[in-house]
Image (tube, rainbow, N blue to C red):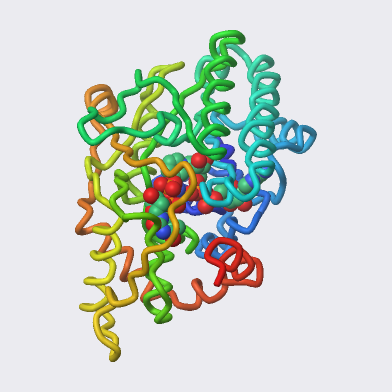
Amino acid sequence: MTLLVTGGAGFIGSNFVLDWLRQSDEPIVNLDALTYAGNLENLKSLDGDARHHFVKGDIGDRALVDQLLATHRPRAIVHFAAESHVDRSIHGPGAFMKTNVDGTFTLLEAARAYWGALDADAKAAFRFHHVSTDEVYGSLKPEDPPFAETHPYEPNSPYSASKAASDHLVRAWHHTYGLPVLTTNCSNNYGPYHFPEKLIPLMIVNALAGKPLPVYGDGQQIRDWLYVTDHCSGIRAVLAGGRVGETYNIGGWNEKANIDIVNTVCALLDELRPSADGPYARLITYVKDRPGHDRRYAIDARKIERELGWRPAETFETGIRKTVQWYLDHPEWVARVQSGAYRDWVSTQYGA
Ligand code: NAD
Ligand code: TYD
C-alpha cells in the first residue's frame, strides 16, 4: 500500500509526510513542484528513508502523474499542492488558477483513469482526498454561527475562489464519475516549517530581526487557528473513516483577532528571547488593509468529531509556544528560506 501525496514539501504537506511516517510504514510518493513555498529541507530527516520517494514535478503534468500512478499503484491520493497565499493571489492570480484549478483538474482526470482500471476491491478502497480551506465559505459577521459544511460557498479572494473551484471539481468528479473523493476544509494552520510570508511566522521572524510587525487595517480580523499536526491527524481520520463524497470541516475552536495573535507572539518572545531594546510589541505597525479582506472565519468542527471522534490535541497556548520555540531553535531554516525571491516578495507587498 502506498499514498501519493501532492505538495508534500510545503508547510502542511511536509508536516503530514513527517507525521505519517512517524506512525506508519506505509510508503509515500511525494510529488511537489518545489515552488518558492516548497522546501526539501523540511524533509531532511527522511534522507535515506526508503518509505519516502520524492518526485519533483507539476500536478499539471498529466504524463508524469499517469506514470507515477502506474508505477506506484497508490491506494489514495492526498492532494495538498496549491498556491496558498491570499496576498500573492491579489498581486498575481494566474498561478492560482493554473495550479489550484487546472492542476486539480489534471490530477482528477489522471486519478479517474487509474481508478477506473483497478480491480473491484482496489476500486472500492481507493480515495482521492482533497485538502481545502475554510476561506471558500467567505466572511462571517460577528454574530454569525461558525461555518458548517452546509454553508454556501462565497469566496472573496482569487485564492479562495480558486480553492472553491477545485472543491467543486472534486465534488463533480464524484457525482458524475463516481470517483471516491473526500474533501476537508480547514481553518488557518500554524506550526513548524510555516513559510514566513504568513501572519504568525512573519511576526516571529520580523520581531527577532527588529523589523516592523505589519498589522493590516485595524487588526480586528478574526481567524480560527489550528496547530498543524492537529490538521494532519484530522486528515488521517477522514482518510481512514470519512464517508465517500462527504466534506468535513476541521478547526481548532479557537477564534482570535489578528492583533491578539501578534501580541501573544510578542509576549512569548519577551519571555523566551527578551530584546535589549524593550518589549517586541513596540514594533507593531498598522499598515494599509488587504483589498477585500475577509473579516472573520470560524469553523464548526462538530461533524468530524461526531462521525470520526476527532478533536484537536493542542490548545492555542500549547501550540503557539511550541511554534515560537521551533523558530527560535531553527534560525538556519529561516535564514535559508529568506532567499532573493523572498526578499522580492517582501518589497512587493510591504514596499517602503
Ligand atoms: P504551501 O504554499 O506551504 O505549500 C504548497 C506546496 O505545493 C509547496 O510545496 C509547493 O511547491 C507545491 N506546489 C505548488 N504548486 C504546485 C504544482 N503545480 N505541482 C506540484 N506541487 C506544487 O501551502 P500549505 O499552507 O502547506 O497548504 C497546503 C494545502 O492546504 C493547500 O491546498 C491549501 O489550500 C490548504 N490549506 C492551507 C491552510 C493554511 O493555513 N496554510 C489552511 C487550510 C487549507
Ligand atoms: P495569512 O497568514 O496570510 O492567512 P489568511 O489570509 O489565509 O487567513 O493572514 C492571516 C491574517 O493576518 C489575515 O487576516 C491577514 C493578516 N495579516 C496581517 O495583518 N499582516 C501580515 O503581514 C500578514 C501576512 C497577514
Is 352 on the left-hand or right-hand side of 209?
A: right
Work out whether residue 182 or residue 99 is closer to the camera in this orientation and state it. 99
Residue at (23, 28) in percent of width and height: 145
Q: Residue furthest right?
A: 63
**Residue plotted at (57% across, 33% down):** 162
289, above or below 111, in the image: below
> Foreground: 337 or 46?
337
Quadrant of the frame with the C terminus: bottom right
**Where residue 156 appears, x then y in whole percent?**
48, 34
Q: Does residue 197 appear left or right of residue 188 in this picture?
A: right
**Residue 304 coordinates in the image, percent (x, y):** 29, 27
Instruction: Classify the position of the N terminus by image quarter.
Output: top right
**How far across and how far down the image is residue 250, in percent?**
33, 35
Q: Count the marks.
A: 0
Asked if residue 19 can be seen in this view, the reply is no
Looking at the image, residue 345 sits to the left or right of residue 66; the answer is left
- Is 174 on the left-hand or right-hand side of 107? left
Name the outermost residue toward the bottom: 276
- In front of the other: 158 or 236: 158
Q: Quadrant of residue 79?
A: top right
Note whether 289 is above or below 121 in the view shown.
below
Q: Quadrant of residue 99?
A: top right
Q: Nearer the viewer, residue 62 or 51?
A: 62
Residue at position x 32%, y 55% from top? 218
- Spot occupied by residue 201 in the image (x, y as percentages of width and height): 41, 64
Residue drawn 52% across the image and 15% down it: 124
Whether residue 162 appears in this view of the structure is yes
Q: Residue furthest top?
A: 176
